[in-house]
Image (cartoon, coloured by chain):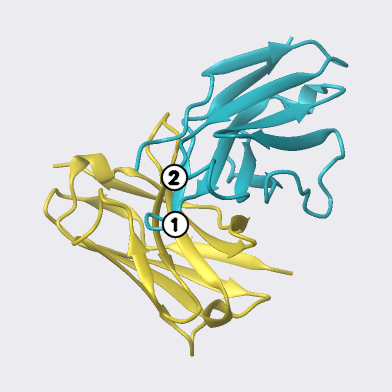
Chain colours: A yellow, B cyan
Amino acid sequence: EVQLVESGGGLIQPGGSLRLSCAASGFTVSSNYMSWVRQAPGKGLEWVSVIYSGGSTYYADSVKGRFTISRDNSKNTLYLQMNSLRAEDTAVYYCASIRNYAFDYWGQGTLVTVSS
Amino acid sequence: QSALTQPASVSGSPGQSITISCTGTSSDVGSYNLVSWYQQHPGKAPKLMIYEVSKRPSGVSNRFSGSKSGNTASLTISGLQAEDEADYYCCSYAGSSPWVFGGGTKLTVL
Protein backbone atom coordinates (compact mmCIF):
# COMPACT_ATOMS: atom_id res chain seq x y z
CA GLU A 1 0.00 0.00 0.00
CA VAL A 2 1.31 3.42 -0.98
CA GLN A 3 1.63 5.84 1.91
CA LEU A 4 3.04 9.36 2.14
CA VAL A 5 3.60 10.96 5.53
CA GLU A 6 4.61 14.61 5.80
CA SER A 7 6.29 16.20 8.80
CA GLY A 8 8.20 19.32 9.72
CA GLY A 9 5.49 21.95 9.70
CA GLY A 10 4.98 24.46 12.47
CA LEU A 11 5.00 28.13 13.43
CA ILE A 12 7.89 30.15 12.03
CA GLN A 13 8.66 33.86 11.98
CA PRO A 14 8.80 35.78 8.70
CA GLY A 15 12.22 35.44 7.12
CA GLY A 16 12.82 32.10 8.79
CA SER A 17 13.52 28.67 7.34
CA LEU A 18 11.83 25.31 7.62
CA ARG A 19 12.38 21.90 6.07
CA LEU A 20 9.44 19.64 5.31
CA SER A 21 9.83 15.89 4.94
CA CYS A 22 7.64 13.35 3.18
CA ALA A 23 8.38 9.72 4.01
CA ALA A 24 7.14 7.28 1.42
CA SER A 25 6.29 3.61 1.69
CA GLY A 26 4.94 1.16 -0.84
CA PHE A 27 6.85 2.68 -3.74
CA THR A 28 10.24 4.21 -4.58
CA VAL A 29 10.49 7.99 -4.49
CA SER A 30 13.47 8.13 -6.83
CA SER A 31 11.64 6.19 -9.55
CA ASN A 32 8.71 8.56 -9.62
CA TYR A 33 7.93 12.18 -10.24
CA MET A 34 7.20 13.76 -6.84
CA SER A 35 5.66 17.10 -6.03
CA TRP A 36 4.65 19.53 -3.31
CA VAL A 37 1.24 21.19 -3.46
CA ARG A 38 0.02 23.72 -0.90
CA GLN A 39 -3.31 25.09 0.23
CA ALA A 40 -3.61 28.37 2.12
CA PRO A 41 -6.35 28.46 4.77
CA GLY A 42 -9.75 28.58 3.05
CA LYS A 43 -8.14 28.78 -0.39
CA GLY A 44 -7.54 26.52 -3.34
CA LEU A 45 -4.70 24.21 -4.29
CA GLU A 46 -1.44 25.67 -5.57
CA TRP A 47 1.29 23.62 -7.21
CA VAL A 48 4.67 24.43 -5.60
CA SER A 49 7.44 22.23 -6.94
CA VAL A 50 8.29 18.98 -8.70
CA ILE A 51 11.31 16.70 -8.89
CA TYR A 52 11.42 14.32 -11.81
CA SER A 53 12.84 10.82 -11.59
CA GLY A 54 15.89 12.03 -13.51
CA GLY A 55 16.50 14.72 -10.91
CA SER A 56 15.28 17.83 -12.76
CA THR A 57 13.42 20.28 -10.56
CA TYR A 58 10.86 23.00 -11.26
CA TYR A 59 9.21 25.62 -9.07
CA ALA A 60 6.22 27.92 -9.09
CA ASP A 61 7.19 31.54 -9.63
CA SER A 62 5.91 32.37 -6.13
CA VAL A 63 8.60 30.23 -4.47
CA LYS A 64 11.42 30.23 -7.04
CA GLY A 65 14.74 31.12 -5.45
CA ARG A 66 13.43 30.52 -1.91
CA PHE A 67 12.33 26.85 -1.88
CA THR A 68 14.37 23.79 -2.82
CA ILE A 69 12.95 20.33 -3.48
CA SER A 70 15.17 17.29 -2.97
CA ARG A 71 15.06 13.62 -2.11
CA ASP A 72 17.09 11.11 -0.13
CA ASN A 73 16.99 7.81 -1.97
CA SER A 74 18.40 5.87 0.98
CA LYS A 75 15.56 7.10 3.19
CA ASN A 76 12.92 7.04 0.43
CA THR A 77 12.01 10.55 1.52
CA LEU A 78 11.13 13.79 -0.27
CA TYR A 79 12.05 17.18 1.17
CA LEU A 80 11.13 20.81 0.74
CA GLN A 81 13.60 23.34 2.11
CA MET A 82 11.82 26.64 2.58
CA ASN A 83 13.85 29.81 3.17
CA SER A 84 12.94 33.49 3.47
CA LEU A 85 9.44 32.54 4.50
CA ARG A 86 6.63 35.06 4.10
CA ALA A 87 3.16 35.34 5.58
CA GLU A 88 1.73 34.31 2.22
CA ASP A 89 3.54 30.97 2.48
CA THR A 90 1.16 30.00 5.31
CA ALA A 91 -0.58 26.85 4.11
CA VAL A 92 -1.04 23.13 4.46
CA TYR A 93 1.71 21.53 2.42
CA TYR A 94 0.97 18.21 0.74
CA CYS A 95 3.43 15.90 -0.93
CA ALA A 96 2.09 13.89 -3.83
CA SER A 97 3.32 11.31 -6.28
CA ILE A 98 2.71 11.87 -9.96
CA ARG A 99 1.59 9.30 -12.48
CA ASN A 100 0.29 10.05 -15.95
CA TYR A 101 0.92 13.74 -15.14
CA ALA A 102 -1.69 13.60 -12.37
CA PHE A 103 -1.23 13.66 -8.60
CA ASP A 104 -2.28 10.13 -7.73
CA TYR A 105 -1.28 9.65 -4.10
CA TRP A 106 -1.29 12.41 -1.47
CA GLY A 107 -0.05 12.68 2.07
CA GLN A 108 -2.19 14.02 4.89
CA GLY A 109 -0.49 17.41 4.79
CA THR A 110 1.53 19.45 7.25
CA LEU A 111 0.61 22.98 8.33
CA VAL A 112 3.14 25.78 8.01
CA THR A 113 2.24 29.06 9.71
CA VAL A 114 4.43 32.08 9.06
CA SER A 115 3.72 34.74 11.66
CA SER A 116 5.47 36.94 14.18
CA GLN B 1 1.03 30.95 -15.01
CA SER B 2 -2.55 32.03 -14.17
CA ALA B 3 -4.93 29.68 -12.41
CA LEU B 4 -7.51 27.83 -14.46
CA THR B 5 -11.03 29.27 -14.21
CA GLN B 6 -13.76 27.27 -12.48
CA PRO B 7 -17.18 28.37 -11.22
CA ALA B 8 -17.09 29.10 -7.51
CA SER B 9 -20.08 26.89 -6.80
CA VAL B 10 -22.54 24.50 -8.37
CA SER B 11 -25.45 22.62 -6.90
CA GLY B 12 -27.80 19.82 -7.75
CA SER B 13 -30.36 17.50 -6.23
CA PRO B 14 -29.74 13.82 -5.52
CA GLY B 15 -29.99 11.78 -8.70
CA GLN B 16 -29.37 14.74 -10.98
CA SER B 17 -26.27 15.41 -13.09
CA ILE B 18 -24.00 18.42 -12.81
CA THR B 19 -21.07 19.66 -14.86
CA ILE B 20 -18.14 21.72 -13.66
CA SER B 21 -16.18 23.65 -16.26
CA CYS B 22 -12.47 24.44 -16.20
CA THR B 23 -11.18 27.05 -18.62
CA GLY B 24 -7.52 27.51 -19.36
CA THR B 25 -5.50 28.70 -22.31
CA SER B 26 -3.77 27.34 -25.39
CA SER B 27 -0.64 26.96 -23.21
CA ASP B 28 -2.17 24.48 -20.78
CA VAL B 29 -5.62 22.87 -21.23
CA GLY B 30 -5.62 23.51 -24.96
CA SER B 31 -2.17 22.07 -25.55
CA TYR B 32 -2.20 18.88 -23.54
CA ASN B 33 -4.66 16.05 -22.93
CA LEU B 34 -3.34 16.04 -19.37
CA VAL B 35 -6.21 17.49 -17.38
CA SER B 36 -6.96 15.93 -14.02
CA TRP B 37 -9.73 16.44 -11.47
CA TYR B 38 -9.60 16.18 -7.68
CA GLN B 39 -12.26 15.83 -5.00
CA GLN B 40 -11.58 17.28 -1.57
CA HIS B 41 -13.76 16.87 1.48
CA PRO B 42 -13.28 19.33 4.38
CA GLY B 43 -10.12 18.68 6.33
CA LYS B 44 -9.02 15.89 3.99
CA ALA B 45 -6.36 15.53 1.34
CA PRO B 46 -7.46 15.79 -2.29
CA LYS B 47 -8.36 12.58 -4.13
CA LEU B 48 -7.68 11.97 -7.81
CA MET B 49 -10.94 11.39 -9.70
CA ILE B 50 -10.01 11.84 -13.37
CA TYR B 51 -6.69 11.90 -15.22
CA GLU B 52 -5.72 12.45 -18.86
CA VAL B 53 -9.01 14.31 -19.42
CA SER B 54 -11.34 11.34 -19.16
CA LYS B 55 -9.70 8.34 -17.49
CA ARG B 56 -10.81 7.12 -14.09
CA PRO B 57 -8.40 5.61 -11.56
CA SER B 58 -9.28 2.22 -10.18
CA GLY B 59 -11.99 2.52 -7.54
CA VAL B 60 -13.52 5.77 -8.76
CA SER B 61 -17.21 5.51 -9.56
CA ASN B 62 -18.23 5.58 -13.22
CA ARG B 63 -20.66 8.35 -12.25
CA PHE B 64 -17.66 10.64 -12.69
CA SER B 65 -16.63 11.49 -16.24
CA GLY B 66 -14.41 14.05 -17.92
CA SER B 67 -14.13 15.70 -21.29
CA LYS B 68 -12.37 18.54 -23.07
CA SER B 69 -13.07 20.89 -25.93
CA GLY B 70 -10.47 23.44 -26.93
CA ASN B 71 -9.27 25.32 -23.86
CA THR B 72 -12.11 24.10 -21.62
CA ALA B 73 -12.30 20.84 -19.71
CA SER B 74 -15.38 19.57 -17.90
CA LEU B 75 -16.19 17.19 -15.08
CA THR B 76 -19.64 15.62 -15.06
CA ILE B 77 -21.10 13.84 -12.06
CA SER B 78 -24.22 11.84 -12.79
CA GLY B 79 -26.66 10.38 -10.29
CA LEU B 80 -25.62 12.88 -7.61
CA GLN B 81 -25.26 11.46 -4.12
CA ALA B 82 -24.92 13.19 -0.78
CA GLU B 83 -21.31 12.04 -0.43
CA ASP B 84 -20.39 13.87 -3.65
CA GLU B 85 -20.69 17.16 -1.77
CA ALA B 86 -17.13 18.46 -1.72
CA ASP B 87 -14.73 20.88 -3.37
CA TYR B 88 -13.53 19.96 -6.86
CA TYR B 89 -10.33 21.15 -8.50
CA CYS B 90 -9.14 20.81 -12.06
CA CYS B 91 -5.47 20.77 -12.93
CA SER B 92 -3.56 20.85 -16.18
CA TYR B 93 -0.01 20.06 -17.16
CA ALA B 94 1.42 23.21 -18.70
CA GLY B 95 4.88 22.33 -19.93
CA SER B 96 7.38 24.97 -18.87
CA SER B 97 5.62 25.84 -15.59
CA PRO B 98 4.53 22.31 -15.20
CA TRP B 99 1.22 22.30 -13.37
CA VAL B 100 -1.59 24.77 -12.83
CA PHE B 101 -4.73 24.27 -10.73
CA GLY B 102 -8.16 25.77 -11.02
CA GLY B 103 -9.54 27.91 -8.23
CA GLY B 104 -11.91 25.18 -7.09
CA THR B 105 -15.67 24.62 -7.19
CA LYS B 106 -17.84 23.93 -4.19
CA LEU B 107 -20.48 21.32 -5.01
CA THR B 108 -23.61 21.40 -2.87
CA VAL B 109 -26.04 18.50 -2.99
CA LEU B 110 -29.43 19.98 -2.16
Does residue A29 appear left or right of residue A89 in this picture?
A: right
Query: What percent of the width, then of the height, locates residue A58?
Result: 35, 64
To the question of a shared chain for discs 2 and 1, the answer is: yes
Gap between marks 2 and 1, in whole Å? 8 Å
* Quadrant where the N terminus of chain B is found in the figure: top left
Could you tell me which chain the residue with mark 2 belongs to? B
Residue at 58 percent across and 22 percent down: it is B106
Q: Residue drawn 68% across and 44% down? A: B53
Q: Residue at x 59, y 41 (%)?
A: B44
SS assignment at label 1: loop
Amino acid identity at mark 1: Gly
Q: In x, y percent, where is residue A65?
A: 19, 62
Side of A27 relative to A61 (left or right): right
From the image, tell me which residue sits under label 2.
Answer: B27
Crowdedness of circle 1 by 10 Å Cα count: few (<14), some, many (20+)? few
Dot 2: what SS? loop
* Pointer 1 chain: B
Name the residue that disc number 1 marks.
Answer: B95
Q: Is residue B22 above or below residue B18?
A: below
Residue depicted at x 13% and y 42%? A116
Q: Residues within 10 Å of mark 2 (few under 14, many from 20)?
A: some
Q: Earlier in the sequence, mark 2 or mark 1?
A: 2
The answer to whether residue A33 is above or below residue A31 is: above
Residue A102 shown left or right of residue B100 in the figure? right
The residue under label 2 is which amino acid type?
Answer: Ser
Q: Quadrant of the C terminus of chain B?
A: top right
